[in-house]
Each structure stands twice: as C-alpha cells, then as structure tokens.
Image (cartoon, rainbow, N blue to C red):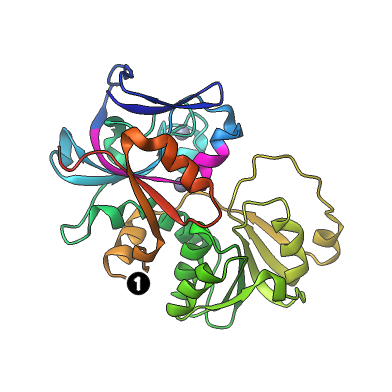
Amino acid sequence: MRAVTLIDGELQYDAGYAPCEAPDGLVEVKVLKAGICETDLQLKQGYMGFSGVLGHEFVGVAQSGRFAEQRVVGEINCVCGRCDFCRRDVPTHCEHRTVIGILSHDGAFADSLFVPEQNLHVVPDHLSTEHAVFTEPVAAACRILEQTHLNSNHSVVVLGDGRLGNLCAQVIATTQADVLVVGKHSWKLQQLQELGIQTMLLSEFQPRSKADFVVDCTGSPTGFPLSLQTVKPCGTVILKTTVAAEQSLHLAPVVINEVQVIGSRCGPFAPALQMIADKIVQVESLITAEYPLDQAIQAFRHAEQADTLKVLLHVSDSV
Ligand SMILES: [Zn+2]
Ligand SMILES: [Zn+2]
C-alpha cells in the first residue's frame, strides 16, 4: 500500500509499503483524509525517536466490526485496559500504550491503518470529512476544559496563533472566559478576531503577570519563559506543545509566584466532534492546502512554512 514513512529521521513516500499483519482485535480503517500536525513536524526532527508510518489526525472508513462501512475518526492512544492508569480511568497514560503515528504504531498517512474498535467514533453524516479531520486537535484543546474549571471570571492568554493556538482559543472561548491570543502573524490573528476573539501581536504585547491562565501553544523554547512573565501569582500555565529541542529553564519564578504548571496532551473526542459538527468551533478557515498522498513530501514542506495553518493529505475519495 501507499504510505508516508519516517525511517532514521528521513521522511519518505513509499508506494509499496508492506503493512504489518492485522493485529488481533484491531479494525482496519481505510483512510479518506489526514492532517499534518505540529507533532508530525517535531517527530521528523527526532522527537520520540519514532520510526514507521506517520499520521494521527484522520478520517477513514471502518472495514469491519460495529462501525463497518461508516466514516470514523479514531482516538490515538491504544491502551491495555489492565494497568494502573487504565484502571484509574486515565488510559491516555497507559503504561503499555502505543500511540497511532507517534509511538510504536503505524499511522494514517497511508491507504489504511489499524485501530482498536473502542477508539473509533462515527462521524455524523452532515459533518464533512475535511472538517472531521480536526477532531483530534480539537479534542486536545478540549483537554484544557477537563484540567481546569474555566469560567467567565477568568482571564486567559493563549500564546501562539498557529493551528493549536487557534483551536485552544476557540474551545476556551466556549467557557465565556476572557481570552486573548498573542501571535506573530496578523492574518492568523485576523481570523480569530473574525470569530470574536481578542488578539495582539507579540511585538506589541507587554507581559504583566496578570493572567489567571496562560496556554503555551508556541511550540517554541521561548514560550515557557514568556508564559511565566504573563501569568499572575498563583495562576496556572498550561503547556500544550511539545518542543523537540532541549531547553534550559529558569524555574525560580515558578516557586516565587507559586505558579501551577500543567502539561496537557490528548483530550476527549466526543465533545470535540460535537463542537465541530455544531460549528461552535470553526475549522474551515484553518485549511491552508490539501495535497494528494503521493505529494506528501511537498505537503510537509508547505506545513513547515510559517504562513500555513493546516495542511491536509487527501488519501482517497471513497473506499
Ligand atoms: Zn496532532
Ligand atoms: Zn494500560
């Protein structure tokens, strides 16, 4: 089958990739579309040391089981169901997990992939495939709502106007919290303004230790120090992006200001699908370009440019 692989740090399009044997109990999902995410770009730079087929944001058609022949999206953590974390209902931290397209599990930049049935969610008929591709990143944004109790009394600064910053801001805005997005690109900020979200250019932003919550979506080593200057004493910094590069941190402000730092990764798919279907979260304007799977290398190059939001891979019209 066709697949986009990362092997020894090298991204390749392989028209004759030999998929692994169907693992027991997993459902084959034939891929319709997939999205290139910041994590894919980080993986390419060596994050997690991943080797295999990339891709964890996808819509496909289930080939067997309960959801056979239906369009589905899939949660990316494939878990054991038996370890301590699984039993404590935090399966995203399963000790034995594989993660689709990220950790020991071939991903979705391919004609098909294998997903545990319990990870699948049916895409509502009226929701288009290219919008449903955003379920995974919107779910990641929804994780913030599980970890905090944001409401209209809170001020939130989102650092970063990229794909994830945009979605986090939209999801946080549903809590009626006061949201400000700080970014480097006026056209990306403009899109947020059109959704009624306040924005500011980084060059004009003065961090004043006033925000109750700061969400770092910069994907940059500069994001955390800026977060610490922006959050108020006893406030909370939520780290949303992984940075492959090592960084040296000055942690004294965390102690002096008693700042809580929360790491935040994968979130719930059901509310994310609903928010996209109900257009509470707008994703259409985030699509910068779409490439056929066999042009994945060009698609990655495009996704790496600063003037893009989401680049999609078109795998198949129907299966
Ligand atoms: Zn992603
Ligand atoms: Zn487990």
- In the displayed structure, would residue 137 be above or below residue 109? below
Q: Position of residue 153 (x, y in %)?
A: 58, 83
- In the displayed structure, would residue 249 be above or below residue 179? above
Q: Position of residue 95 (x, y in %)?
A: 52, 31
Which residue is pictured at 84% across the width and 53% down the height? 250
Which residue is pictured at 74% across the width and 63% down the height? 226
Q: Quadrant of residue 32?
A: top left
Q: Which residues are magenta?
A: 29-42
Q: Position of residue 144 (x, y in %)?
A: 52, 61
Is 24 in front, or is 241?
241
Is 184 in front, or is 157?
184
Q: Position of residue 193 (x, y in %)?
A: 49, 78
Reading the image, the residue beneath label 1 is 280
Residue reaching furthest to the left: 69
Q: Amino acid at mark 1?
A: Ile
Residue 105 shows up from this direction:
no
Q: Quadrant of the C terminus?
A: top left
Q: Is residue 107 left or right of residue 49?
A: left
